[in-house]
Image: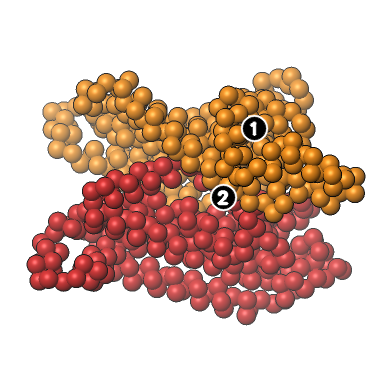
Amino acid sequence: MTSGAIAVRRAAQAVPLLLMVSVIGFTLLHLVPGGPLDVYLGSPNVRPEDILRLRTAYGLDQPLPVQYLAWLAAFVKGDWGYSFTDGRPVLTRLLERVPATLELMVSALSVALVVALVVSLWRARRPRGAGAVEALSVAGISLPVFWLGLVAQLVFAVALRWLPSSGRMAFDGAGLADRLRHLVLPALVLATVHVAAWTRYLGASLDGVLSAPWLKAARSRGVPARLLMRRHALRPALLPFVTVVLLDAALLVSGAVVTESVFAWPGLGGLFAEALARRDYALLMAFLMLTSGAIVALNLLADVAYRWIDPRLRDA
Amino acid sequence: MSDSTSRAPASPARTAALMALGIAAVALLLPAVAPHAPDAIDLVARRVGPSMSHWFGTDDIGRDVLSRVLHGARLSLFVGLASAVVTLLLGVGVGVAAGWRGGWLDLLLMRATDALLSMPRLPLLMVAAAILEPGAAALAVLVGATGWMETARVVRAEVLSLRERSFIEAVRASGAAEWRILARHLVPNAAPTIAVAATLAVGRGILLESALSFFGVGVRPPAPSWGNMLYQAQQSMTTAPWVALCPGLCIFATVFVINAMGVRLARSGPEARPA
């Protein structure tokens, strides 16, 4: 089967998943006692007959499956509803946050990739450092991310005053230097967990390759150590790692929720936390769909990339 | 951590069980040594830094941080342990059913597992917790019910290989009932794998509880948990940083110890042992 056909088949398999997420999300959001109009019930400014009128207008008097189908039909057409909090279309609100999130994600991923690569290559050559690297990486996956963010703010922004504590820029149209200074802390915090996980993974992968018989053969042929590591050991070790990185990038989409809200980063995650605090249901639903869509897309990419990189799988 | 070969591999399942008991005992005993009541308000001593009477300082409304941390351990550790139990029940159940029966059931269960693995877990949990407003037990169920998929996968893989081994064949030939084969022979032999998965699940459960509570949708105040202490500490980060440092350090230290145990258990597991 060609990779194109595989991609199409995997994409088709993603449809039931997205439907499932939408059903779960929709049911959850309609479990709220009193429904979405609950907020108006206690308000002295809203008359009971207005609530009834709104209920009919929004179709909230219909049975749940009917409401779901109506939502689904609109969603597929690109009508994702309106945000309760400011009345603007949900899709607009989400899309304007995408650049900030991408900026943060790409920076965090790049930092994590470079550090994980450097550390695991260093460790592979010095077995004595293995214990320390192992301990550090277990520490890294045990850190509560939001707390790490708070401590980073406290140390680098409040105590040392080296970096700004939150936000994406000091004012609209601020220069590159200012933007970079704002990016450092959230990107490093977001990268930490992945550095830890990837160092562990890549380390194990390299160890496996380094003890392979064909690597001993290369060494006995007199291939220089540097070349041996870079060409003969790293390349095969990177194969499964590419998949891991892409799958983790998918987690990053939803993991950014924590980092973004701690650092008041104006991205999707921050918007989600805001929507959660204000019970902005249309926005929450759209965010769930968007993140599952992103995860599905990255999984698909991982699958295709793996076949593309490994020539043995290309025609399999 | 590097010289795993020199140590005699203790039974991972027993180690994990002992550890769980240890955690539960610590969580139950800690409140007894707390110097103050966790909700005792001292309005004169608000946001006081660490001192002899308040080792870890006091919070916004003058509650002793150390006492709240010690009491908070109970809820945080309970959610961690209970969510791991839910993860185990579901993960082992699905893994054994899929691996043992095979065929269409295997296909169906593994498809479902794959699908659930690609759901955005944290946002979904946050929405669910915000709307359902669960208590500690329900929170543990929510966390466990969204995290059993990796366990199901490793257990299935283990069952697939155990199924073909001759001792299982021998038991089957001797005419043992199917449930007996599963309960007495199959699951006990998969115990090392299950123990590793369980250990890591406890750590993840504690981290998730703290993240949910940090967003104000997990364990609700006034009952202290490590996560909701951090939620409350956020407002006074610059004036009273000790309020945030303490519970966070507790989360980190606890999860670190548990994860380190999990890593070591995995090392002493059957695949690491020379055959």
Residue type for callout 2: Leu
Q: Give the orange chain's letter.
A: A
The image quadrant that residue B100 belongs to is bottom left
How is this picture coloured? by chain
Question: The C terminus of chain A appears in which quarter of the rendering?
Answer: top left
Residue B52: image x %, image y %?
Answer: 73, 72
Q: CA distance from mark 1 to mark 2?
A: 20 Å
- Which label is found at residue B58? none
Q: Is residue A62 above or below residue B36?
A: above
> 10 Å neighbourhood of mark 2: few (<14), some, or many (≥20)?
some
Residue at 66% x, 37% y is A282
The image quadrant that residue A122 belongs to is top left
- Which label is found at residue B125? 2
Q: Residue furthest right?
A: A45
Q: Nearer the viewer, residue A93 or A137?
A: A93
Q: Tell me the subunit letter for badge 1.
A: A
Instruction: Tell how many labels.
Output: 2
> 10 Å neighbourhood of mark 1: few (<14), some, or many (≥20)?
many
Disc 1, SS: loop
Q: Are marks 1 and 2 on the same chain?
A: no
Q: Is residue A174 left or right of residue A45?
A: left
Residue B10: image x %, image y %?
Answer: 28, 69
Residue type for callout 1: Gly
For the question of whether residue B78 can be seen, the reply is yes
Mark 1, residue position: A267
Q: Colour of chain B?
A: red
Residue at 39% x, 29% y is A12
Q: Residue furthest bottom?
A: B32
